Amino acid sequence: MNSATASLAQRLSSSRRIVIVTHMNPDGDAMGSSLGLANHLSEAGHFATVIAPNEYPEFLAWLPGQELVKVFSIEKELCRKRMMDAEIIFCLDFNTLSRIGEAGEAVKASPAFKVLIDHHEQPETFAELLFHDVKACSTAQLVFDLIEGMGEKERISKNTGMCLYTGIMTDTASFRFPSTSAHTHAIAGYIKEIGVETWLAHEQVYDGNSYNRLRLTGYALSEKMKILKEVNCAYITLTKEELQRFGFRMGDTEGLVNYALSVRGMRLAAFFMEKENEVKISLRSKGNIDVNQLARKYFSGGGHRNAAGGNMKTTLAQAVELFEKVVQDPSQFQQ
Ligand code: 5GP
Ligand code: MN
């Protein structure tokens, strides 16, 4: 056992109240890694709470352990109290407190011992203990490794396995991205071996489209995608009004940006979504185009080299105008 793992195992042995907090607009890895860890700890007798800063999409609302989740934006006082009372706070799948909104203040204020488990670039230093690897395909994989590191692999339950599998599956786009390693497949293999019905995760996450969501996707692809051929870039925009027209529900635009990147020859893709007081931007790239740098430099965001995001407090048109301008010189964010 390495020293960080040993130190965590020792702390866990004398702590009962655990909070696991994950990032705003939780995705499959955020919920999968958090619930995977929460199930594992609950089964060992800990009192674990998962705190999501805001609501998470319906296609993740089947993951085992839902009853352990509290949504900060809905139950602020309860969430603050759980964080103040916690002995350990785990921060999963983010590494800057700005990613968890108002919940960040509560994390800072809590006297709990803080542990960061994450795979995004350039972590901030707010945790006492760090399990961080940018090469890991997902935070769920890091949680699996940590459990194994503590000698508890044989104790991984089907519920925990299902959550961790879902985190890995969603963050690798079903084992497609280059971050998928032999080790990733070995973990998936182990999870299958213990009897988890992994096909259910695919069905729940990918085959649960609403009629509206599919129509919104069709509209975005046929009417709202623009290609900047000279710079091998494709992007999609959606206004508030357009989202409303298709009865937008959280999660409906998840993955839309990947279609833009899938156009032959594209090396950079973006998706702009107009929100109440800001524009949310999703960025994807191939090869050495570093969208983490692009997001940090122009869109107050961050992420990974090939998948990042950010936001702008401007109009949609202004955000798109800035984007079109900066992509003319890709050398500034090429690695
Ligand atoms: P998505 O485009 O799917 O929302 O996010 C892609 C990646 O970028 C994720 O790994 C996510 O954590 C990161 N990301 C998205 N939005 C932001 C943001 O506003 N700030 C930071 N630091 N990272 C973001
Ligand atoms: Mn992740």
Image (spheres, rainbow, N blue to C red):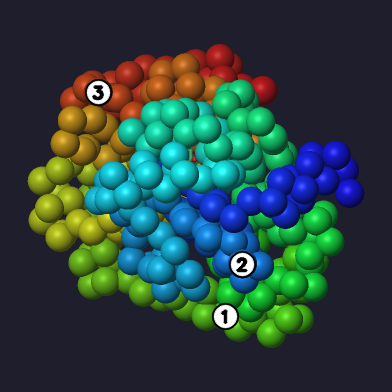
Whether residue 309 can be seen here: no
Question: Could you tell me the amino acid type at mark 3?
Answer: Lys
Instruction: Point out residue 232 in the picture as x, y percentages from the top left corner.
Output: 49, 34
Comes first in the chain, label 2 or label 1: 2
**Residue 211 to residue 113: above or below:** below
**Residue furthest right as drawn:** 1
- The answer to which of 296 and 245 lies nearer the viewer is 296
Discs 2/3, front? 2
Dot 3: element: loop
How far apart are the two marked residues, 2 and 3, measured between alpha carbons? 45 Å
Dot 2: element: loop
Instruction: Point out residue 102 in the picture as x, y percentages from the top left corner.
Output: 33, 33
What residue would you read off at disc 3?
313
**Could you classify mark 3 by the number of other residues whose Cα lies within 10 Å: few (under 14), some (14-19), or many (20 or more)?**
some
Query: Residue visible at 21% across and 38% down?
Result: 275
Label drawn at residue 45: 2
Query: Residue visible at 28% across and 66% down?
Result: 214
- The answer to which of 45 and 155 lies nearer the viewer is 45
What residue would you read off at disc 1?
199
Question: Could you tell me the amino acid type at mark 1?
Answer: Trp
Comes first in the chain, label 2 or label 3: 2
How far apart are the two marked residues, 2 and 1, measured between alpha carbons? 29 Å
Q: Decide: marks 2, 1 in contact (CB < 8 A)?
A: no
Dot 1: element: helix
Comes first in the chain, label 3 or label 1: 1
Residue behind label 3 places its C-beta within 8 angstroms of ligand 1: no
How far apart are the two marked residues, 3 and 1, measured between alpha carbons? 40 Å
Question: Could you tell me the amino acid type at mark 2?
Answer: Gly
**Could you classify mark 2 by the number of other residues whose Cα lies within 10 Å: few (under 14), some (14-19), or many (20 or more)?**
few
Q: Decide: marks 3, 1 in contact (CB < 8 A)?
A: no
**Could you classify mark 1 by the number of other residues whose Cα lies within 10 Å: few (under 14), some (14-19), or many (20 or more)?**
few
